[in-house]
Image (cartoon, grey):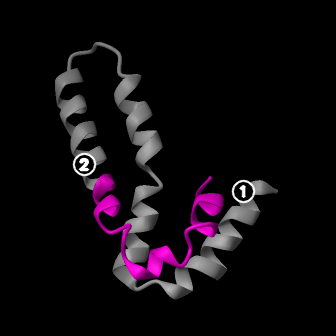
Amino acid sequence: TLHAIGIGILVFRILPDLDAITALMLMNAMCLAPACLSLISRRAEKMTLIYIVLDVLAIGAQSTIYWKTISPSLVNHRLSLPVSLT
């Protein structure tokens, strides 16, 4: 139920007020926690170094939303944004 409420807030309240680029970056940033957990849970294997480099690049790319968090379109949703993403 909480997942459905969060998706409803995100889709019907937050995303209509945002431009396409900001909405895309926001939805990309939602994958940041799984990317960090993937980096932490790597086991030692033959290709581990390549996977760690790719994980760090993915975390860097998904962290690009944080430079845009000051935009006026996101400031209007300072309460509903964390609720919907949680």
Residue 54 in the image, given as x and y percentages of width and height: 22, 39
Q: Which mark is residue 44?
A: none
Q: Please, what is the three-letter code of the amino acid marked with disc 2?
A: Gly
Report whether 11 appears left or right of 73.
Answer: right
Residue at 62%, 66% (x, y): give it: 79
**How many numbered callouts?**
2
Residue 67 in the image, given as x and y percentages of width and height: 28, 63
Q: Please, what is the three-letter code of the amino acid marked with disc 1?
A: His
Report whether 69 appears left or right of 82.
Answer: left
Residue at 40%, 86% (x, y): give it: 19
Residue 77 in the image, given as x and y percentages of width and height: 56, 74
Marks 2/1 in contact by CB < 8 Å: the verdict is: no
Distance of label 2 from label 1 (alpha carbons): 26 Å
What range of the chain is rendered magenta?
62-86
Report whether 52 appears left or right of 71.
Answer: left
Earlier in the chain: of badge 2 and badge 1, it is 1
Residue beneath label 2, please? 60
**In the image, residue 8 above or below residue 6:** below
- Choose top left, top right, bottom left or bottom right for residue 23: bottom left
Question: Please, what secondary structure does the residue beneath circle 2 have?
Answer: helix
Residue at 75%, 64% (x, y): give it: 5
Residue beneath label 1, please? 3
Please check the rendered image and state whether residue 50 is part of the magenta-colored stretch, yes or no: no
Which quadrant is home to the N terminus?
Answer: bottom right
Which residue is more in the foreground, 42 or 81?
Answer: 81
Please check the rendered image and state whether residue 79 is part of the magenta-colored stretch, yes or no: yes
